[in-house]
């Protein structure tokens, strides 16, 4: 444990040291990707506390995610200053609101709603309008933007016009729904996440005793990711820090990717105008990525324009040489996914941990092809944004056993070590140090528990004297903050979800015009934000980086262009290649004929159309089931249940999750179309060539009305679903 201020400074480079020593007044840190900004600001707080310039109880560090706040608290604890508050804006505000509201108004504050979608649905119905699920999400996003920019319902149409924003529906309709939403929410005694900030601002603004108490409590503020602050958060920060002795903000305008939520880099770039005496420090030494990755990132921003581009940082890699980034063109999206999975499998065979590999895409709808391709190669993967780590049943169970043994002191230690003690407890639950075969549910559960053991090893390395009870306290704190350990598996994530993360190998996929930049980026500012989003993706890679695109969406489909952002990058410090010839050859030899030489059906070329109304389908879920979500379903309920029962059996045989066989959406499509032959089955999205060969005979037998031992199903069989209201799809 670091014991002196000099130790804190010795661990930093010259620029980071300047940040650490700036403990009085205002300081603005412009920190590029991978330059150690979290290290700099946590060491600054530690230096301030150890020198007596700051008091832990008077110091508040705020950031934007619970994970980032938990990491900051962990680092501060390791530096010997555990008493400092590190929270998200909303967490800090909610804590103050919960404390002061009863004192001012009596009783508890309004109840917080986890999601707005149901209240928005009620508001839409109240306004006698109709909206499907996608429209409800879009309307919810507009309400969040309006509240983040402090725009009232009556002012929404004017604000949208001034911001050159294109709402999903007429601005007047959105304003009407927004007003109804606020009325319904208030009538139910609820508040949303934006209200947490608004109500805290109201207390600080209108109640001098509350404002004075908060300003007396906190005298030192640190704000991470300052480029993502919106007007509502800035207003709260102004009230908090009005009497502060020090204010440190850190950010990178080139990583501003949330302007659609109201975030703006203007506060970061204009900080010295508001604080003329503020010290400015630039962090440009990149400790994360190789010179090849950093060089590509710098060249990408060299073509940028706009206000943020004027303040871009030229990163300088501090690492050794690495492989050149790869630029790869594919014939179609399926070929791109299969090639990516093949490369990932090869990396794992070479010894790269799956947890150190990521596939990043622009929208979540792109994930399905990569899930399928990885599953076909039995490669475990984690979809970012899926079930939270500490909510998994096997993790909760393991933590329960650890807590029980910590209380009873009944675990036998191996060589007296904390990891040995944890290993012994987990062993008593049936967990083995040897992973199960395959990449199915059994392996996923094993990996989750193994992550707890790795966490114990890391915890013991930092705190050699720690006991099992200390470790269970650490786990509880992490669970409360959702600060999950790394689980083995390739990460699949959108570029937005990847912010703040890093991997040894990164595959940036789907880099076509219309997707990167996204089709609805129709202004210069929106185009530049798309460029910054790609920059965020590039800078997630430590060593290996692949950028790929497809010539067409489907085999033989309409030609598409590679992203304009790749212009001037290919062939400069990178290796260019084309797989466009190889997939064509592969299709002719592998997709065209089966192993027995018989002709295999080819997937239909062109856009997928709804089989009910013939509209071209854009949404991934709609393409999967082959119809609009609002069009009537003619699913054969009995066939669907038979397919699910068959899928469960095959999944258990192969020790794989059920979705690896077929997803619920694919089973729904099969039960609706009831294919009679391989050609019809192959036309269903989600039925790949591999799945057709592996499962086609079984599925067609079920669709023909036979069970899997050849007995016909009686025509008069009456099937009563257990739950009439249960959704068929995922």
Image (cartoon, grey):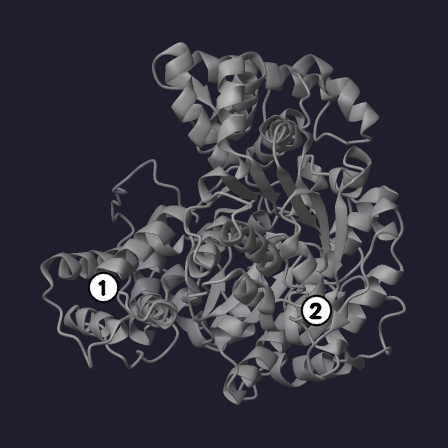
Closer-to-camera residue (310/81): 81
Rate crowding at label 1 as few (under 14), some (14 to 19) or many (20 or more) other CA atoms within 10 Å. many
Closer-to-camera residue (440/403): 403
Whole-percent x, y for residue 321 in the image? 72, 84
Task: Report whether 529 appears left or right of 728.
Answer: right
Rate crowding at label 2 as few (under 14), some (14 to 19) or many (20 or more) other CA atoms within 10 Å. many
The picture quadrant where one finds residue 259 is top right
Does residue 385 show up?
A: no
Whole-percent x, y for residue 7 in the image? 53, 66
**Compared with residue 380, is residue 153 higher up or lower down, i.e. above or below?**
above
Q: In which quarter of the image is the N terminus?
A: bottom left
Q: Residue at x 31, y 37 (%)?
A: 724
Q: How many numbered marks are there?
A: 2
Closer-to-camera residue (172/71): 71
Q: Residue at x 34, y 40 (%)?
A: 726
**Compared with residue 430, is residue 592 higher up or lower down, i.e. above or below?**
below
Label number found at residue 388? none
Asked which secondary structure carries label 1, the reply is helix
Q: Which residue is drawn at 73% across and 29% down?
A: 167
Residue contact at pointers 1 and 2, CB within 8 angstroms: no
Q: Which residue is drawn at 14% across and 71% down?
A: 428
**Compared with residue 317, is residue 284 higher up or lower down, i.e. above or below?**
above
Whole-percent x, y for residue 669 in the image? 49, 53
Task: Report whether 436 appears left or right of 481.
Answer: left
Closer-to-camera residue (13/200): 13
Asked which secondary structure carries label 2, the reply is strand
Label number found at residue 468? 1
How far is the residue under mark 1 from the one under mark 2? 37 Å
Does residue 440 show up?
A: yes
Whole-percent x, y for residue 314 in the image? 82, 64
Label number found at residue 286? 2
């Amino acid at each position: 444990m670091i014991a002196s201020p000099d130790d804190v400074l010795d661990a930093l480079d010259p620029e980071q040291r300047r940040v650490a020593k700036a403990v009085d007044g205002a300081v603005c840190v412009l920190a590029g990707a991978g330059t150690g900004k979290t290290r700099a600001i946590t060491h600054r707080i530690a230096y301030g506390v150890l020198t007596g310039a700051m008091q832990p109880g008077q110091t508040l560090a705020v950031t934007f995610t619970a994970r980032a706040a938990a990491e900051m608290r962990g680092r501060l604890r390791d530096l010997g200053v555990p008493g400092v508050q590190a929270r998200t804006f909303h967490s800090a505000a909610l804590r103050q609101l919960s404390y002061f509201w009863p004192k001012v108004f009596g009783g508890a504050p309004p109840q917080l709603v986890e999601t707005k979608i149901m209240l928005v649905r009620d508001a839409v119905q109240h306004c006698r309008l109709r909206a499907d699920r996608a429209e409800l999400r879009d309307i919810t996003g507009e309400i969040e933007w309006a509240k983040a920019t402090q725009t009232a319902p009556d002012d929404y149409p004017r604000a949208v016009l001034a911001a050159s924003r294109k709402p999903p529906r007429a601005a007047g309709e959105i304003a009407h729904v927004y007003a109804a939403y606020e009325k319904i929410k208030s009538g139910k005694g609820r508040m949303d996440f934006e209200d947490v900030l608004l109500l805290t601002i109201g207390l600080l603004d209108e109640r001098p005793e509350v404002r004075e108490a908060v300003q007396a409590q906190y005298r030192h503020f640190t704000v991470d990711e300052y480029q993502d602050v919106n007007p509502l958060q800035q207003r709260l920060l102004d009230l908090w820090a009005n009497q502060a002795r020090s204010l440190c903000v850190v950010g990178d305008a080139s990583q501003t990717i949330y302007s659609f939520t109201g975030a703006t880099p203007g506060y970061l770039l204009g900080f010295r105008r508001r604080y003329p005496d503020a010290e400015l420090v630039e962090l440009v030494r990149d400790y994360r990525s190789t010179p090849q990755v950093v060089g590509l990132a710098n060249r990408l921003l060299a073509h940028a324009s706009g206000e943020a581009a004027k303040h871009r940082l030229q990163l300088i890699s501090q690492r050794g040489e690495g492989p050149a980034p790869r630029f790869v063109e594919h014939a179609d999206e399926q070929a791109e996914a299969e090639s990516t999975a093949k490369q990932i499998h090869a990396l794992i065979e070479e010894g790269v941990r799956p947890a150190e590999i990521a596939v990043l895409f622009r929208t979540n709808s792109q994930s399905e092809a990569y899930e399928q391709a990885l599953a076909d190669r039995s490669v475990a993967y984690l979809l970012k944004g899926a079930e939270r780590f500490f909510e998994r049943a096997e993790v909760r169970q393991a933590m329960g056993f650890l807590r029980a043994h910590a209380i009873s002191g009944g675990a036998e230690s191996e060589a007296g070590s904390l990891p040995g003690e944890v290993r012994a407890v987990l062993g008593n639950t049936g967990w083995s140090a040897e992973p199960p075969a395959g990449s199915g549910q059994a392996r996923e559960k094993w990996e989750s528990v193994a992550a707890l053991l790795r966490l114990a090893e890391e915890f013991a390395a930092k705190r050699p004297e720690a006991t099992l009870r200390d470790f269970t306290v650490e786990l509880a704190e992490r669970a409360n903050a959702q600060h999950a350990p790394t689980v083995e598996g390739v990460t699949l994530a959108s570029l937005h979800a990847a912010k703040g993360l890093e991997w040894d190998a990164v595959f940036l996929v789907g880099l076509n015009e219309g997707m990167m930049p996204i089709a609805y980026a129709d202004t210069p500012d929106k185009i530049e934000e798309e460029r910054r989003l790609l920059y965020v993706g590039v800078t997630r890679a430590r060593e290996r980086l692949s950028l790929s695109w497809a010539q067409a969406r489907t085999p033989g489909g309409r030609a598409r262009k590679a992203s304009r952002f790749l212009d001037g990058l290919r062939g400069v410090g990178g290796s260019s290649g084309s797989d466009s010839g190889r997939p064509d050859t592969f299709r002719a030899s592998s997709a065209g004929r089966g192993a027995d030489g018989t002709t295999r059906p080819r997937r239909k070329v062109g856009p997928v159309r709804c089989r009910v109304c013939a509209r071209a389908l854009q949404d991934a879920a709609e393409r999967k089931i082959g119809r609009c979500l609002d069009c009537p379903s003619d699913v054969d309920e009995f066939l669907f249940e038979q397919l699910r029962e068959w899928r469960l059996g095959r999944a258990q045989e192969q020790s794989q999750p059920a979705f690896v066989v077929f997803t619920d959406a694919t089973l729904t499509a099969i039960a609706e179309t009831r294919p009679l032959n391989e050609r019809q089955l192959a036309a269903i999205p989600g039925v790949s060539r591999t799945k057709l060969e592996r499962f086609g005979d079984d599925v067609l037998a079920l669709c023909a009305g036979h069970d899997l031992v050849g007995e016909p199903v009686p025509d008069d069989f009456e099937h009563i679903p257990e739950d009439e209201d249960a959704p068929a799809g995922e």
